Image: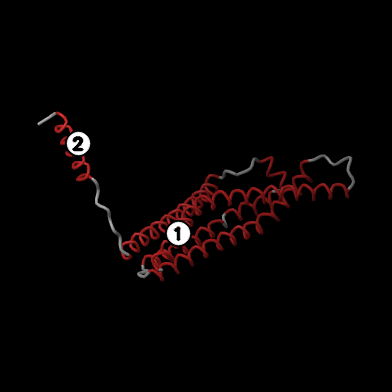
């Protein structure tokens, strides 16, 4: 055998070896694709359920720490400036966040059970769409509820801080009231901005990741339904 023929045989052996080691292409049927999407959907909602439980646990721990440690969020000087009564209201409202956590836990658990038991393409698609819509509206309503509770309180804090922390000897009563109102609106504006940015980042990233995955699952379900 010539060297050239020997080299050709080596090349053929290499090609055969590569061909044998290639993975077999998998042809997935409609049922197989549905099962994969079903598992992915259950996994996404399950993670959201775990996140809501962690939020609730974090809120409980913060509330217990505040009650039993006696530690305050603000310094004594700040509390005197904004008023002890106003600060007590702020502390009480901070515990209301636990209600929101309970709502999110209830909603995610309910839809986790519904999605887990959805055994048809159409049923799974409808349940995912309802879940995404419910969570989206729950987030919007919760942000609005938080603003309604917190913004008036922040205005009260701003007004009190101006009245208690600034020397007003050179001001008339009317000037004092006007400046106190301006300070109140500044406090409210800062709080509105903070809540908006925080919620956009937190819900947009944490919840948004899983809601977008579920949205992709809906598209895939539509493709196998058609």
Residue 65 lies, in percent from the top left, at 51, 47
Residue 29 relative to residue 147: left or right: left
Toward the viewer: 220 or 25? Answer: 25
Residue 17 relative to residue 124: left or right: left
Q: Quadrant of the N terminus?
A: top left
Residue 209 lies, in percent from the top left, at 48, 52
Q: CA distance from mark 2 to mark 1?
A: 48 Å
Q: Quadrant of the C terminus?
A: bottom left
The color scheme shown is secondary structure
Label 2 sits on residue: 11
Residue at 17% across, 39% down = 13
Label 1 sits on residue: 214
Residue 39 lies, in percent from the top left, at 35, 59
Is tag 2's residue or tag 1's residue first in the polypeptide sequence?
A: 2
Return the residue found at the far left.
1
The dot on residue 226 is: none
Using the image, determine if residue 121 lies above or below residue 16: below
Quarter-of-image position of residue 165:
top right
Secondary structure, mark 1, is helix
Residue 214 lies, in percent from the top left, at 45, 59
Say which of marks 2 and 1 sits in front.
2
For label 2, the crowd category at 10 Å Cα-Cα, with few meaning under 14, some 14 to 19 and many 20 or more, is few
Residue 218 relative to residue 16: left or right: right
Secondary structure, mark 2, is helix
Toward the viewer: 194 or 37? Answer: 37
Using the image, determine if residue 226 lies above or below residue 47: below
Residue at 36% across, 68% down = 117
For label 1, the crowd category at 10 Å Cα-Cα, with few meaning under 14, some 14 to 19 and many 20 or more, is many
Return the residue found at the far top.
3
Residue at 64% across, 52% down = 90
């Amino acid at each position: 055998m010539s060297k050239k023929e020997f080299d050709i045989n080596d090349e053929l052996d290499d090609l055969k070896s590569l061909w044998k080691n290639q993975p077999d292409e998998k042809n997935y049927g409609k049922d197989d694709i549905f099962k994969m999407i079903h598992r992915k959907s259950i996994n996404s909602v399950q993670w959201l359920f775990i996140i809501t439980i962690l939020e609730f646990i974090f809120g409980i721990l913060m509330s217990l720490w505040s009650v039993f440690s006696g530690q305050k969020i603000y310094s004594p000087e700040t509390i005197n400036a904004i008023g002890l009564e106003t600060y007590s209201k702020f502390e009480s409202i901070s515990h209301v966040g636990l209600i929101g956590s309970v709502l999110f836990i209830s909603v995610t658990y309910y839809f986790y059970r519904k999605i887990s038991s959805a055994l048809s393409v159409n049923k799974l698609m409808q349940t995912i769409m309802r879940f995404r819509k419910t969570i989206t509206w729950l987030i919007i309503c919760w942000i609005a509820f938080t603003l309604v509770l917190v913004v008036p309180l922040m205005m009260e804090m701003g007004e009190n801080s101006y009245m208690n922390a600034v020397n007003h000897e050179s001001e008339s009563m009317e000037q004092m009231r006007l400046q106190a109102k301006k300070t109140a609106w500044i406090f409210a504006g800062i709080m509105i901005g903070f809540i908006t940015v925080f919620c956009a980042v937190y819900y947009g990233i944490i919840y948004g990741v899983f809601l977008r995955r579920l949205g992709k699952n809906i598209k895939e379900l539509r493709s196998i339904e058609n």
